[in-house]
Amino acid sequence: MKRKYRGVIVLIYLCTCLFLAFFIMSISFSLLGYWVGGGKDIIDFFTTKLITYCKVALTGPLIGVITWFFYYR
């Protein structure tokens, strides 16, 4: 791998991994809390909150860019 592309690959990797991690955590914690609270029809709850999960997960690329800029660059 060429050295000049290494920083860009790390940036893409950080943003993607943090997006997926926050997306999975927000889904799992929200659905677990709804289920423990005695919620019914969990699929309907999931589909109505899908946009919220994506908004929470979009903080991942922001944190990835900040981490890349101050640590890897």
Image (tube, rainbow, N blue to C red):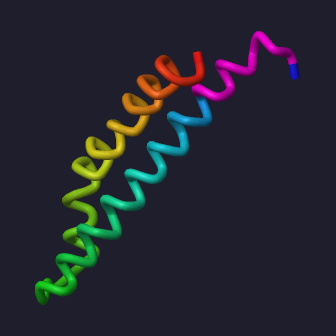
The x and y percentages for residue 6 are 74, 21
The x and y percentages for residue 63 are 39, 32
Q: In which quadrant is the N terminus drawn?
A: top right
Q: Quadrant of residue 61?
A: top left
Front in this rendered view, residue 28 or 45: 28
Residue bounds of the magenta highlight: 2-11
The x and y percentages for residue 64 are 46, 31
Q: Tell me which residue sits at (59%, 29%) in the image.
A: 12
Q: Tell me which residue sits at (28%, 55%) in the image.
A: 50
Q: Is residue 12 magenta?
A: no
Front in this rendered view, residue 24 or 69: 69
Q: Residue furthest front?
A: 71
Provide the major secondary structure of the magenta segment. helix
Up-down: is 57 above or below 37?
above
Q: Is 49 on the left-hand or right-hand side of 67?
A: left
Q: Is 4 on the left-hand or right-hand side of 22?
A: right
Up-down: is 11 above or below 17?
above
Q: Residue furthest right?
A: 1
Q: Tell me which residue sits at (26%, 73%) in the image.
A: 31
Q: In which quadrant is the C terminus drawn?
A: top right
Q: Quadrant of residue 30?
A: bottom left
The x and y percentages for residue 10 are 64, 28
Q: Is 62 on the left-hand or right-hand side of 31?
A: right
Q: How many marks?
A: 0
Q: Is residue 4 magenta?
A: yes
Q: Is 58 on the left-hand or right-hand side of 38?
A: right
